[in-house]
Image (cartoon, rainbow, N blue to C red):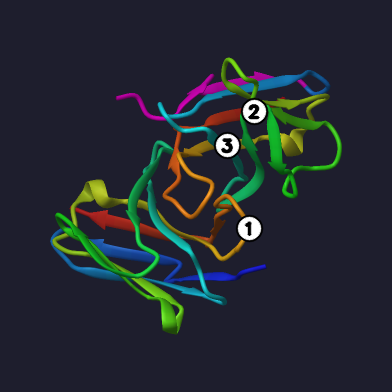
Amino acid sequence: NAGVMQNPRHLVRRRGQEARLRCSPMKGHSHVYWYRQLPEEGLKFMVYLQKENIIDESGMPKERFSAEFPKEGPSILRIQQVVRGDSAAYFCASSPLDSAAALHFGNGTRLTVT
Amino acid sequence: GIQVEQSPPDLILQEGANSTLRCNFSDSVNNLQWFHQNPWGQLINLFYIPSGTKQNGRLSATTVATERYSLLYISSSQTTDSGVYFCAVDGEETSGSRLTFGEGTQLTVNP
């Protein structure tokens, strides 16, 4: 009974490169959320997706960041032309419902930009 | 948006002690969760508790929605309880569950 799976666990990129973070939700869950945790801070909502739809991207930076959740395959958070300030832990969560329900989080991807 | 305040920000205990962590929120909620982030960064779901009381082993939680606070109780603390405890709430009426996290309580349990 696998939980939310994120990969890679750790990702190192040089400034200007692209980072691609993957998230497979729990079985039976069709709602995916991405959160970012900067050092010494709590998690901040970025984007909410359902299959093939972005429902709410109000927490996403306006430039360089994008997310998708295709019909087949994992959800992808893509960061283009990374900068040092993008260094953070990125967590994915999933839930089975679009109404209030417990979110289940993955173990996160720790992005380091050198 | 909804505001979440957690207290205390830091807590140091001796093994075996009991503790209470508090979470205040500024508006009505339809989702409230407590999480434990362990020293390896993993985020562990403790309770989904928008109202009422729940218990799981040495941990229990109570949310008084009408007074806009939640409490997390840890009894007979162990060194493995160390880490950051987050309260997160969602007060939106729209679809989905976009949690707003507090800044956390950093708990250190010494042997």
Percent coordinates x, y for residue A85 in the rendering: 75, 39
Q: Chain of mark 3?
A: A
**Viewport quadrant of the N terminus of chain B:** bottom right
Badge 2 crowding class, 10 Å Cα cut-off, few under 14, some 14 to 19, many 20 or more, is many
Image: A71 above or below A39: above
Q: Which residue is mark 3?
A: A89
The mark total stands at 3
Could you tell me if the residues under marks 1 and 2 are in contact, i.e. CB atoms within 8 Å?
Answer: no
Residue located beneath label 2 in the image? A112
Q: Is residue A6 magenta?
A: yes
Q: Amino acid at mark 2?
A: Thr
Distance from the alpha carbon under mark 2 to that under mark 3: 9 Å
Q: Which residue is mark 1?
A: B94
Q: Is residue B29 above or below residue B80?
A: below
Q: Is circle 1 on the same chain as circle 3?
A: no
Mark 1 residue type? Thr
Mark 1–mark 3 distance (CA, rounded to whole Å): 27 Å
Residue B111: mark? none
Which chain does the residue under circle 1 lie in? B
Residue mark closest to the camera, 2 vs 3:
3
Q: Residues within 10 Å of mark 3 (few under 14, many from 20)?
A: many
